[in-house]
Image (tube, helix red, strand yellow):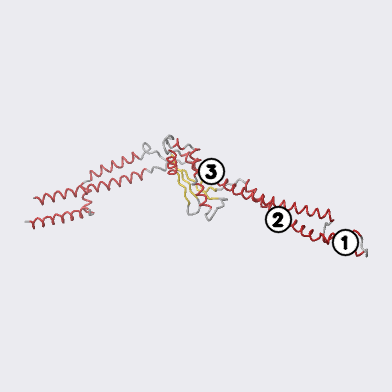
């Protein structure tokens, strides 16, 4: 008799395994659906109705999307980054985000309690969930902002671009002001050098009467040899030229070289000054933001479809489990009998 019981148990396990395999066959599945069709239809109607209801504006506030597409302009990268990558970094900066939160009073707009602990972190998370900034394959930047108010969403995009231009302009001016200070310092140094050389030349002219070394050497020599014995003035001039002529040539050369360098430095200074005072924009609109006339979130048909498919899948899974349990119970009763 123990051997008989073992045989019965083995047959029971085999039948259960066989039924489990059949339970998931297409034919068996179709039979189950037909058998439970009324229940499934009721569940699907409920799923469609409830998902449509809960995705309505009564439960979920609709959001409107405003979009802008931009190309960078006049941006000078600081390292190996591209202008578009620099634009992305600036758009994602904390000061632009904080300025938008302040300007549009997003604490109140998002209905967040300012007395709650860590409330600003909540505001930031809410803001980041509603803002999407990304680079396209064409090196442009797309800004998308969602909000329950279509006009505010549009204004936020425009203000973000405005803040970006201000930030880029400030960075450019800060950099240009550093260049301007260096150019001004070099210009002042060169001016001091020129003034020093000029005083030395004036001293040589006043004390030794040297005005033009080449011309004076030629004329003094002519006057000296013409008078045979040499005039006193010509002789004095020749002596002065012999004594200080080399110094005059050296100082003159340095003076003219310093003057040329000063002119070049002045050009650099004027260019840096223009960079400081110029008022440029750093974005070019490909697509400007406009207030949306149609909501972008939630998309009701997606919510209804996903909810319906999920409900159908879970319902069939539960039905399979119920049927499998019943099969086991019947097999158990047969075995017991």
Return the disc, 1 or 3, that comes first in the chain's sequence: 3
Q: Label 1's element?
A: helix
Q: Nearer the viewer, residue 87 or 210?
A: 210
Side of 139 where 190 appears, left or right: right
Mark 2 and mark 1 in contact? Answer it, CB < 8 Å: no
Q: Residue 322 in the image: state x and y as whole percent.
A: 20, 47
Q: Nearer the viewer, residue 155 or 231?
A: 231
Q: Label 2's element?
A: helix
Between the residue at mark 2 and the residue at mark 3, the CA separation in whole angstroms equals: 40 Å
Side of 194 where 312 appears, left or right: left
Q: Nearer the viewer, residue 99 or 214?
A: 214
Q: Residue 232 in the image: state x and y as whole percent.
A: 91, 59
Q: Which residue is mark 3?
A: 163
User: Disc 2 or disc 1, which is closer to the eye?
Assistant: 1
Q: Residue 55 in the image: state x and y as whole percent.
A: 35, 40
Return the disc, 2 or 1, that comes first in the chain's sequence: 1
Side of 147 where 198 appears, left or right: right
| Numbered mark located on residue 220 in the image | 1
Q: Quadrant of the N terminus?
A: bottom left
Side of 333 where 28 appears, left or right: right
Between the residue at mark 1 and the residue at mark 3, the CA separation in whole angstroms equals: 73 Å
Q: Label 3's element?
A: helix
Name the residue: 54% across, 54% down.
Answer: 79
User: Disc 1 or disc 3, which is closer to the eye?
Assistant: 1
Q: Which residue is mark 2?
A: 261
Q: Residue 211 in the image: state x and y as whole percent.
A: 83, 56
Mark 1 is surrounded, within 10 Å at the Cα level, by few (under 14), some (14 to 19) or many (20 or more) other residues, namely many
């Amino acid at each position: 008799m123990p051997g008989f019981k073992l045989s019965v148990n083995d047959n029971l396990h085999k039948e259960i395994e066989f039924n489990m395999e059949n339970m998931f066959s297409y034919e068996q599945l179709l039979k189950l659906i037909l058998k439970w069709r009324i229940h499934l239809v009721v569940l699907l109607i409920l799923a469609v109705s409830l998902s449509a209801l809960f995705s309505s504006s009564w439960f979920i506030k609709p959001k409107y999307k405003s979009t802008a597409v931009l190309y960078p302009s006049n941006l000078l990268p600081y390292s190996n980054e591209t202008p578009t990558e620099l634009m992305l970094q600036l758009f994602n900066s904390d000061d632009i985000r904080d300025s938008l939160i302040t300007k549009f009073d997003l604490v109140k707009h998002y209905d967040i309690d300012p007395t709650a602990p860590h409330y600003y972190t909540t505001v930031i998370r809410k803001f980041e969930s509603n803002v999407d900034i990304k680079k396209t394959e064409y090196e442009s930047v797309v800004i998308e902002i969602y909000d329950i108010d279509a006009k505010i969403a549009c204004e936020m995009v425009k203000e973000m671009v405005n803040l970006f231009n201000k930030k880029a302009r400030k960075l450019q001016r800060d950099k240009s002001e550093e260049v301007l200070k260096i150019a001004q310092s070099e210009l002042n140094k060169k001016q001091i050098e020129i003034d020093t050389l000029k005083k030395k030349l004036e001293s040589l002219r006043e004390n030794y009467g040297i005005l033009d070394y080449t011309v004076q050497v030629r004329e003094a020599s002519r006057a000296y040899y013409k008078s045979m014995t040499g005039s006193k003035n010509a002789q004095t001039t020749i002596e002065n030229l012999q004594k200080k002529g080399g110094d005059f040539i050296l100082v003159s050369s340095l003076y003219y070289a310093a003057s040329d360098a000063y002119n070049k430095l002045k050009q650099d200074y004027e260019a840096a000054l223009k960079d400081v005072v110029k008022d440029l924009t750093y974005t070019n609109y490909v697509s400007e933001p406009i207030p949306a006339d149609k909501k972008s979130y939630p998309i009701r048909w997606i919510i209804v479809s996903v909810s319906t498919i999920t409900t159908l899948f879970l319902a069939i899974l539960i039905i399979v489990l119920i049927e499998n349990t019943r099969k086991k119970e019947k097999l158990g009763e047969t075995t017991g009998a």
